[in-house]
């Protein structure tokens, strides 16, 4: 198989994996945010407001990061160093997931 085609397939499979992991992170962050505000004993209307707007804001950030990651990985195919780019995207993502998951376990 042509190395360029193999790298392209690998980049897009990795991109889909990062897409799924980052979506999971968005939901973890949203649950942490709403859970923390819930324990501050706020008005249920405010809690609903925060919950709905946090989904919108975090989702908008997620969409932006998805397109940014796709371009970053696609340029990694052309310039080489796709493994380094996977590491640059995956490491902070996995650390944030672990931190968010850890915060949920502490509470």
Image: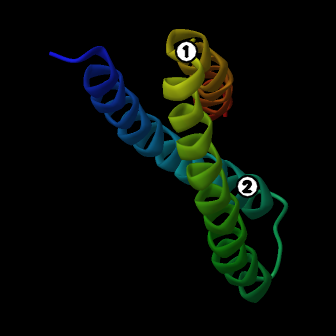
Residue 97 is tagged as: none
Left of 46 or right of it: where is 5?
left
x 70%, y 60%: residue: 61
Q: Find residue 1 and report its horizontal and vertical position in percent.
A: 14, 15
Up/down of 30 relative to 75, above or below: below
Circle 1: element type: loop
Query: Is the residue marked by circle 2 packed among few (<14), some (14-19), or many (20+) residues within 10 Å?
Result: some
Q: Which one is in front, 88 or 96? A: 88
Reading the image, the residue beneath label 2 is 33
Q: Label 1: which residue?
A: 80
What residue is drawn where x is 43% and y is 37%?
15
> Is residue 99 visible from the viewing direction of this image?
yes
71 vs 52: above or below? above
Image location (x, y in percent) of residue 79: 60, 21
Residue at image position (62%, 28%) is 93
First along the sequence among labels 1 and 2: 2
Front: mark 1 or 2:
1
Q: Is residue 49 left or right of residue 72?
A: right
Q: How far across and how far down the image is residue 18, in percent?
A: 47, 36
- CB within 8 Å, label 1 to label 2: no
Location of residue 16 in the rendering, given as x and y in whole percent from the top left corner? 37, 41
């Amino acid at each position: 198989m042509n190395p360029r085609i193999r790298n392209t397939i690998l980049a897009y499979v990795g991109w889909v994996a990062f897409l799924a992991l980052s979506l999971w992170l968005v939901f973890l962050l949203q649950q942490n945010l709403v859970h923390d505000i819930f324990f501050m004993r706020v008005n249920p209307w405010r809690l609903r407001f925060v919950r709905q707007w946090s989904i919108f804001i975090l989702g908008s950030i997620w969409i932006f990061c998805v397109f940014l990651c796709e371009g970053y990985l696609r340029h990694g195919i052309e310039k080489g160093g796709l493994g380094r780019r996977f590491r640059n995207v995956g490491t902070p993502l996995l650390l944030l997931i672990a931190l968010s998951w850890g915060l949920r376990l502490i509470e």
